Amino acid sequence: MNWMPLLSTLAGAVIGISATLIADRNRWRREEARHALEVRREVYSEFVSALKTAGEEIRAVALGDHMSDSARDAAVREAFRGTGIYTASERLWLVGPPQVVSAANEAFHSWRAIRDAYAHGLTVGSAEEAPLIAQRRTTMARMRHLMREDLGVGPLEIE
């Protein structure tokens, strides 16, 4: 019996199945990478939005009138907590690469420093507020830059 046609058919089948498996694996990897990128984009947007909202909320409380220092402290802390920033931060810690998580953590702590200062009576627009605002701007710019880099968007070049 001539084995050559059978071996040729078998070799062709192995090559075809292998090529299909490799192509499917590559497609799966691309889809997983695309999905992971979309998840990070969503988490980054949620975190940055929560930070901005927290800033607006604590500033609004700091501009308001309060019966006592303790009432102001409680109001500022509740305004910060009520924005969902802690949940957004935890999501970012789960899916972000180390450099983005580190930068986001610095930005988060710069906002908390402002929150604490407002809670202790710092006046919006005062000279004492200026270095805190400068630090916040620096940390936010670094965080946004790293997030955009991770997402493949590129720098804004306006900060």
Image (spheres, helix red, strand yellow):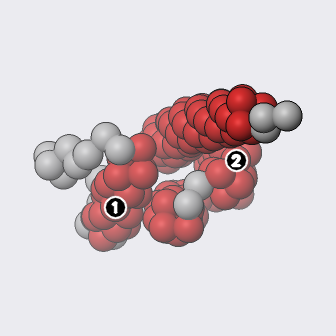
Q: Are marks 1 and 2 in contact (CB under 8 Å)?
A: no
For label 2, the SS is: helix
Q: In this rendering, does residue 101 appear at all? A: yes
Indicate the position of residue 35 as horizontal and vertical percent values. Answer: 61, 33
Q: 36 or 119: nearer the eye?
A: 36
Amino acid type indicated by mark 2: Arg
Indicate the position of residue 89 as horizontal and vertical percent values. Answer: 65, 52
Marks 1 and 2, how far apart at CA: 19 Å
In screen coordinates, is 87 left or right of 55?
A: right
Q: 147 or 115: nearer the eye?
A: 147
In screen coordinates, is 121 left or right of 80?
A: left
Q: Which mark is residue 34?
A: none
Q: Earlier in the sequence, mark 1 or mark 2?
A: 2
Q: In this rendering, does residue 78 appear at all? A: no
Q: Which mark is residue 142?
A: 1
For this orientation, the residue located farthest to the front is 1
Residue ID for mark 2: 91
- Tell me the crowding category of disc 2: few under 14, some 14 to 19, or many 20 or more residues within 10 angstroms, Cα based: some
